[in-house]
């Protein structure tokens, strides 16, 4: 009997889940959750080409200010995010910036504001399979700093606010009780989303770089919500987060 080593399988080949082969992507990838937000990134780019769309993973490439950029959707949650990062790394991506939606749990954060992650509370199951429970989920320092600078600049230009801090990654969207939300707020957690803990842990373990900037979709301690996809504030927040991520990719030559 020969047991498959998944950690060694698939390198240098077309990837099973994302459908991409070496040479089809750049060294930096922007990661929205929703495949239908991948074309939003494409609107910033020239020479846009859709590379693959398999399951929840949709990928395109293009050029922004002279730099080739890849955009790949992760789907919702840590399991599919970990798969996307693992497979993108096997075909040549070395830096990742998540551009997503996130709910605030601190007063004064408004829907449409920009949220930059400086670290993640790991409340997911995926990273437990990768690392000790005490292993930190933290972004690349230079990427986080550049995202903070870009978000502050862009927010000032548009009359909104940029915030940075520690977020939480949860697995169970509808299991987030008022008591849990209040506990996160008490701990000073800025916002909750569902992907960054896997992104950060996998990136660190594989020698990759990662960061995250989100648009605030709602404030769970102030009852404000913009989950309506037609709401322009949330859409504008997505656009501004993408701009900040692209500027960071160029500034750091990722």
Image (spheres, rainbow, N blue to C red):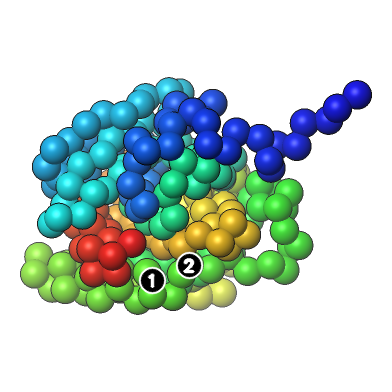
Residue 103 visible in the current orientation: no
Asked whether disc 2 touches disc 1, contact meaning CB atoms under 8 Å apart, the reply is yes
Q: Which residue is mark 1?
A: 144
66 displayed left or right of 90 = left
Which mark is first along the chain, 1 or 2? 2
Q: Nearer the viewer, residue 191 or 240?
A: 240
Residue 208 visible in the current orientation: yes
Report, in whole angstroms, how far the alpha carbon at label 2 lies from the one at label 1: 6 Å
Quadrant of the image occupied by residue 144:
bottom left
Q: Which residue is mark 2?
A: 139
- Measuring from the top left, give residue 66's x and y in whole percent: 15, 55
Residue for point 25% across, 76% down? 149
Quadrant of the image occupied by residue 113:
bottom left
Quadrant of the image occupied by residue 71:
top left
The answer to whether 15 is drawn above or below residue 43 in the figure is above
Q: Nearer the viewer, residue 27 or 158?
A: 27
| Label 2 crowd (10 A; few <14 / some 14-19 / many >=20) | many
The answer to whether 235 is drawn above or below residue 211 in the figure is above
- Measuring from the top left, give residue 143's x and y in whole percent: 37, 69
């Amino acid at each position: 009997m020969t047991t498959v080593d998944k950690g060694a399988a698939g390198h240098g080949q077309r990837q099973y889940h994302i459908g991409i082969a070496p040479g089809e992507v750049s060294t930096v990838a922007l990661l929205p959750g929703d495949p239908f937000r991948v074309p939003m990134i494409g609107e910033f780019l020239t020479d846009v080409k859709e590379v693959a769309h398999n399951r929840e993973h949709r990928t395109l490439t293009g050029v922004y200010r002279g730099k080739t950029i890849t955009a790949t959707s992760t789907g919702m949650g840590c399991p599919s995010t970990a798969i996307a990062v693992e497979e993108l790394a096997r075909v040549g991506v070395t830096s990742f910036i998540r551009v997503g939606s996130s709910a605030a749990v601190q007063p004064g954060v408004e829907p449409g504001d920009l949220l930059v992650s400086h670290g993640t509370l790991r409340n997911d199951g995926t990273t437990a399979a990768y690392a000790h429970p005490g292993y930190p989920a933290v972004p690349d320092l230079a990427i986080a700093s550049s995202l903070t600078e870009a978000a502050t600049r862009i927010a000032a230009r548009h009359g909104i606010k940029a915030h940075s801090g520690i977020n939480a990654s949860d697995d169970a969207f509808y299991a987030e009780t008022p008591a849990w939300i209040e506990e996160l707020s008490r701990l000073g957690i800025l916002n909750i989303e569902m992907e960054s803990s896997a992104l950060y842990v996998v990136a660190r373990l594989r020698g990759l770089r990662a960061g995250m900037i989100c648009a605030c979709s709602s404030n769970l301690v102030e009852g404000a919500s913009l989950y309506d996809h037609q709401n322009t504030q949330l859409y504008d927040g997505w656009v501004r987060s993408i701009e900040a991520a692209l500027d960071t990719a160029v500034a750091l030559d990722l």
